[in-house]
Image (cartoon, rainbow, N blue to C red):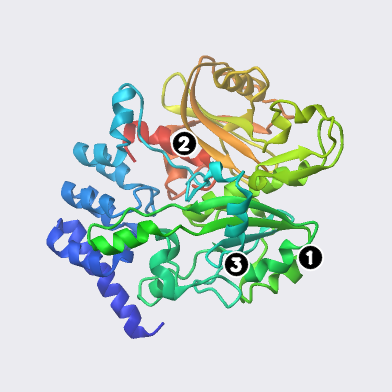
Amino acid sequence: MTSLQLSAKDEMVERFLDAAARGDLTSLSPLLSNYPALINQSGHRGWSGLMLAARNGHFHVVEMLLAEGCDKFSVNSSSQTAFDIAKFWGHRRISDLLARTDDACQRALPTSDLTQRENYFSRETLDRLSERRTDGVWLEAKQSSPDSVYILFSNLRPMLCSREEAGPGVRVRSHQAFRLSTMEAQESAGFHANPWASTTQTKLCRFGHDAVRDLLQKPGTVLIFLGVEKQRKPSSSSSTSSQTEERSREPPAWFAINIDEESNDLLQLSREANSFFPQQLNRDLLQLSEDEAGILSQARAVLAWHSRYSYCPTCGSSTRLEEGGYKRSCLRPDCRSLQGIHNTSYPRVDPVVIMLVIHPDGNQCLLGRKKIFPVGMFSCLAGFIEPGETIEEAVRREVEEESGVKVGPVQYVSCQPWPMPSSLMIGCLAVAVSTDIRVDENEIEEARWFPRQQVTDALFKGAKPAFTLPPRQTIAHQLVRHWIGMTSNL
């Protein structure tokens, strides 16, 4: 990128952010009409136009940016969303708008906490179209379509790349960028021609059918259907004819492939200089965008199930893949698993409770650490839910088993899919009714009550924090942040 392009980028982003901060709708509308990719750009310390408008109380700017598809879940360098900022500065009308869900849902559940909390790995970027999984003709047509997207796994490790522009082996259709969803349109060559494109984020390598045709013929290949790209709501600046044309097209379908093959051989398919298969999944898979993390979560969890259930759990016979990869059926005709509905025939999800325990005084929380944690890191306690157990009872049992602390009230906060291999982390707050700690050293090596100020310093990277927390992509981090924000609105 030339210095002239960099200068153009800086100037355009600065104009956009300044207009948002001042509440200047007259300037914002033409900027977004001509350069729609500006909408989620950020400036100093990661502040977006939506955050600046929320900070300064410009309701109509916030309303317009949301209508244009602005990402209200993005965070600045202090891990604050636009909702957090509006709430902190007392702009109630804006915070209510940012927290709003479907109005019908609000009428049906008037007493529910409807604030949307989106955790990493949980964004539904694709429409799963489960009703199409039994349509073999439709699936076969989509598999061979030049518009379809394939992501590739080697032994459950996804192929990633760290470059912004894809090479010849990766699917890019700059001349058809208008046909893509918001997520992909921003990554097409047409978007890169504009000067504000990011160049550093790790991404999933994407392939077309021609690139993976030979892999699909190999007997050990597992292919699953993920869904189709969600249709973007037409921009208010789009013409009626272009809106009609966009609605008439079928969105691209996405598939995932897993193959037990040497990763070096598979990397040759990409032709990306910086393509790789991650070695440390707990670290490397946290570097994706929120959109791609959601796709990765779905794909890896289902593929991991296939890797463990190639034989029937009921009789031990071989099984075959059906319904786009969301079912395995036994090949033995008289197997009991073929009669009725059996949970062994469908992808497995393991429910896990993860909880932040609050001291009875309300100003401390209980955190623990395992031996495998990095030095100085503490996190929320967690454990698997047992058969016949409620979420609340699982929280109480796990906390007492690991720390000796007894828990009373339990409140659900949010959940997070965790595709390593396939858990659903159910995040809760719990109030302790005892405070003495007796650590079960088989589970964790240490647990402590941490004062709110120490937790705040660790959360927002104070000068000398007493400990460190897991990264923001984890639900443990978000539970801590939720607790701090309950009173301080950070």
Quarter where residue 448 is shown = top right
N-terminal of the pair, mark 2 or mark 3, is 3
**Near-viewer residue (152 or 456):** 152
Disc 1/disc 3 C-alpha distance (Å): 18 Å
Q: Position of residue 490 (x, y in %)?
A: 34, 41
**Near-viewer residue (35 or 411):** 35
- Position of 377 with respect to 14 (left or right) is right
Residue type indicated by callout 2 = Val
Residue type indicated by callout 3 = Phe
Please tell me whether mark 1 sits on a helix, a strand or a loop: loop
Image point (58%, 18%), residue name: 390
| Quadrant, the N terminus | bottom left
Q: Position of residue 245 (x, y in %)?
A: 34, 62
Pointers 2 and 1 in contact (CB under 8 A)? no
Residue type indicated by callout 1 = Glu
Image point (74%, 29%), residue name: 442
N-terminal of the pair, mark 2 or mark 1, is 1
Q: Is residue 223 above or below residue 6?
A: above
User: On the image, numbered disc 3 is attached to which residue?
Assistant: 207
Q: Is residue 443 above or below residue 281?
A: above
Residue 24 seen by the camera: no
Disc 2/disc 1 C-alpha distance (Å): 41 Å
Disc 2/disc 3 C-alpha distance (Å): 39 Å
- Neighbor class of circle 3 (other Cα within 10 Å; few <14, some 14-19, many 20+) is many
Q: Position of residue 471 (x, y in %)?
A: 52, 48
- Neighbor class of circle 2 (other Cα within 10 Å; few <14, some 14-19, many 20+) is many
